[in-house]
Amino acid sequence: MKMICLLWFLLPAVSMAQHTLKLSAGEDPPPAVLQQMEWIQGSWKGEAFGGITEEVWSPPAGDSMMFVFKLTENDKVKFYEFGHIMQVGESLTLQLKHFDADLGGWEEKDETIDFRLVKLEENHAYFEDLTFERVSDTEMNVYVVIGENGSEGEVTFNYKRQ
């Protein structure tokens, strides 16, 4: 079960435009190294779901790039995400977990939401149902598919570097 199910309450805010990809059945993720993702490191801020979104990404180290995400609405935290992009063999996987404002976990203790790499280009990193797009050195878009049971849509997060 992906974040897709867990963010069902946000579905009215989604777009049907598609910037995300999936691997075909049996297809292996392409070769990649973390240094190809280092352009996302730093602090980013934007607006989505009627609130303010923030992401902070570490530089590549120890076979991972960790991140934290926060959504605030009316000066109150709605939820957090904690995760990383990690080197898995010759490719990359993004894993995350969700937490309420009081840090109550959404997923089971040993469960993560995993997004395998589909394709890596100079200004795009396509993970399954999640895409990073470098618009410029100071702006990026993140596209995420949310929903379930055929009612999926894509959410766009537009971020400015802080």
Image (tube, rainbow, N blue to C red):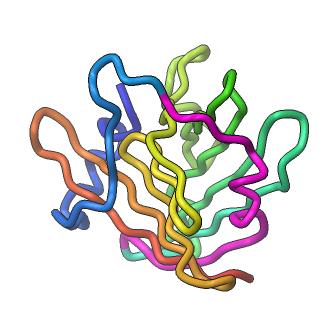
Q: Residue furthest left?
A: 150
Please indicate whether residue 59 sits to the left or right of residue 113 in the image.
Answer: right
Residue at the location (34% across, 33% down)?
Answer: 23
Closest to the observer, 72 or 138: 138
Using the image, determine if residue 14 lies above or below residue 128: below
Residue at the location (60% across, 16% down)?
Answer: 109
Q: What is the x, y in percent for residue 130?
A: 42, 50
Q: What is the x, y in percent for residue 13?
A: 25, 67
Q: Quadrant of the C terminus?
A: bottom right
Q: Quadrant of the N terminus?
A: top left
Closest to the observer, 94 or 75: 94
Q: Say whether residue 33 is magenta.
A: yes
Residue at the location (27% across, 58% down)?
Answer: 154
Q: What is the x, y in percent for residue 33?
A: 72, 41
Q: Say whether residue 149 is magenta.
A: no
Residue 158 in sight from this viewpoint: yes
Closest to the observer, 95 or 39: 39
Range covered by the magenta-colored residues: 29-49
Please indicate whether residue 27 sits to the left or right of residue 31 in the image.
Answer: left
Residue 123: quarter of image: bottom right
Q: What is the x, y in percent for residue 100?
A: 55, 44
Residue 74 in sight from this viewpoint: no
